[in-house]
C-alpha cells in the first residue's frame, strides 16, 4: 500500500510563497503554474497518469497561486527551515516531494530539489556567516539524500564540482521570461521618475555585491550624460548578504527602489538599453525579460549570462566600467542596428519555455514516483 501511495501523491514545497519575490521565487511560481496547466490538460507521463498534485503551504504564506488542477493546503505551525524539516517532511513522507527554491527536507528520499547556483561555495564573500554555514551544510546533505535539479548548464557544472558529484546527477530545468510578456506596462512610472522614453538606461537587481551595480553606476558617471540617467530598480537584503553596494547620491543615477511588475515592464519598453553587470549568476533572467520587450541588452561576461544570452547582447567584463560606458554611448548613437539585435533576441527567447521546463520536471518526478 505504501508503494501505491508513493506513486499517486506528488507534493510541492510551497515555502517560496512566504518569501520576498526574487528570481528564485519567481522561478518556483511560474514553474508550478506551468505544471498546473499540463496536469489540467492531462499532459503528464504515463507513470503519473493517476497521480494527485498538492502544493503544501506554511502558515505564514502570504500569497497563493491561481491553480486549477493542483490542490493547495496550509499546514503546521512552524516557519522557515523548521517547517521544511519537520512539518513539510512529515506531511509529504508517503509521496514524492519537489522543492523549487533551494531548500527542503534533508531526510526525504523521494525528493527533487532545485539548487539555483553555487554562490555559497564559489563566492562566500557575498554572504553573512550564518547564511553561509547553513546553506553550505544543507547543500552537502541534499547531495547525499535528494535528487537534484538546477537551472543552467553552468550551474550544473559549478554545483557538481562544489559538491563533488557527477554532472549527470543534475537535471537542468531552465527559467523562461514568458511570464512577463503578459504583464500590462504601467507607463506612468516614467513621469513619476522624471524620465523620458528612450532617454535612460535601466538596471534591475538588488544592491547586493554579486549584482555589481556599482560598475553600472560608475559607467553612468563616466558617460556624463545627465539627459540619459541610469535608473536602478531593486533593493538589498542585509540579513542574508554580508554587505551591499551603491548609494542614493551617485552622479547620473536614479534609485527607484522596488517597483511593481507593471512598472518594470514599462521601463523595459522605453529604456535606451538594459544594463546587467552581474558578477555571478545561476541563470540570469532579467536580460531575457528585457528582450521580451525588445530592449537592447548590455551584459557582463559572467558565464551563465553568456550561456543564456548568446549573441543577442553586447558584452563587457564585469568590472570594466569604461567599456560599459562606451557601449552605453554607442547605444545612444544607435550602434549597433536595433534590427540585428531584435532578430537575435527573438531566437534566444525561443529557447526557453516554462512548459518545456515543467515537462522536464514531470519526467523526473515520474521516475521518482515509480522507483
Image: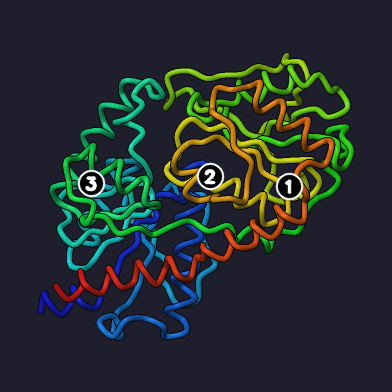
First of labels 1, 3 by sequence position? 3
First of labels 2, 3 by sequence position? 2
Q: Secondary structure at mark 1?
A: helix
In this rendering, is residue 9 above or below 289? below
Residue 118 falls in image quadrant? top left
Residue on which disc 1 sits: 268
Residue on which disc 3 sits: 85
Mark 1 vs mark 2, foreground winner is 1
In this rendering, is residue 11 above or below 39? above
Q: Secondary structure at mark 2?
A: loop
Q: Is residue 44 left or right of residue 208?
A: left
Mark 1 vs mark 3, foreground winner is 1
Whole-Å distance between the Cαs marked 2 and 3? 22 Å
For image coordinates 42% across by 79% down, the residue present is 39
Q: Which mark is residue 21?
A: 2
Q: Quadrant of the N terminus?
A: bottom left
**In front of the other: 100 or 18:** 100
Q: Secondary structure at mark 3?
A: helix
In this rendering, is residue 183 above or below 326? below
Residue 322 falls in image quadrant? top right
Amino acid at each position: 500500500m505504501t508503494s501505491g501511495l508513493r506513486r499517486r501523491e506528488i507534493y510541492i514545497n510551497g515555502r517560496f510563497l512566504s518569501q520576498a519575490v526574487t528570481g528564485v521565487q519567481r522561478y518556483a511560481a511560474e514553474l508550478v503554474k506551468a505544471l498546473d496547466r499540463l496536469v489540467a490538460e492531462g499532459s503528464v507521463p504515463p507513470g503519473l497518469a493517476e497521480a494527485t498534485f498538492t502544493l503544501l503551504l506554511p502558515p505564514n504564506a502570504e500569497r497563493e497561486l491561481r491553480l486549477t488542477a493542483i490542490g493547495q493546503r496550509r499546514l503546521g505551525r512552524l516557519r522557515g527551515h523548521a517547517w521544511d524539516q519537520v512539518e513539510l517532511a512529515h506531511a509529504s513522507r508517503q509521496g514524492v516531494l519537489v522543492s523549487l527554491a533551494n531548500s527542503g527536507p534533508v531526510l526525504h528520499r523521494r525528493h527533487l530539489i532545485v539548487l539555483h547556483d553555487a554562490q555559497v561555495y564559489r563566492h562566500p564573500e557575498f554572504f553573512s556567516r550564518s547564511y553561509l554555514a547553513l546553506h553550505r551544510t544543507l547543500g552537502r546533505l541534499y547531495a547525499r539524500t535528494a535528487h537534484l535539479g538546477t537551472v543552467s548548464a553552468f550551474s550544473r557544472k559549478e554545483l557538481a564540482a562544489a559538491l563533488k558529484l557527477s554532472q549527470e546527477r543534475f537535471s537542468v530545468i531552465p527559467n523562461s521570461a514568458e511570464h512577463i510578456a503578459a504583464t500590462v506596462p504601467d507607463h506612468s512610472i516614467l513621469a513619476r521618475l522624471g524620465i523620458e522614453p528612450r532617454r535612460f538606461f535601466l538596471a534591475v537587481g538588488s544592491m547586493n555585491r554579486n549584482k555589481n551595480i556599482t560598475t553600472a553606476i560608475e559607467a553612468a558617471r563616466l558617460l556624463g550624460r545627465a539627459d540619459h540617467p541610469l535608473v536602478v530598480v531593486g533593493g538589498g537584503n542585509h540579513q542574508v548578504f554580508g554587505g551591499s553596494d551603491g548609494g542614493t547620491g551617485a552622479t547620473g543615477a536614479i534609485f527607484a527602489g522596488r517597483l511593481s511588475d507593471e512598472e518594470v515592464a514599462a521601463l523595459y519598453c522605453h529604456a535606451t538599453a538594459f544594463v546587467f553587470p552581474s558578477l555571478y549568476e545561476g541563470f540570469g533572467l532579467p536580460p531575457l525579460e528585457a528582450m521580451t520587450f525588445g530592449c537592447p541588452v548590455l551584459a557582463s561576461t559572467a558565464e551563465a549570462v553568456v550561456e543564456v544570452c548568446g549573441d543577442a547582447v553586447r558584452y563587457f567584463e564585469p568590472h570594466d566600467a569604461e567599456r560599459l560606458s562606451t557601449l552605453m554611448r554607442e547605444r545612444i548613437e544607435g550602434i549597433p542596428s536595433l534590427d540585428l539585435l531584435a532578430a537575435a533576441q527573438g531566437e534566444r527567447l525561443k529557447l526557453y519555455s516554462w512548459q518545456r521546463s515543467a515537462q522536464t520536471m514531470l519526467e523526473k518526478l515520474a521516475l521518482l514516483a515509480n522507483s
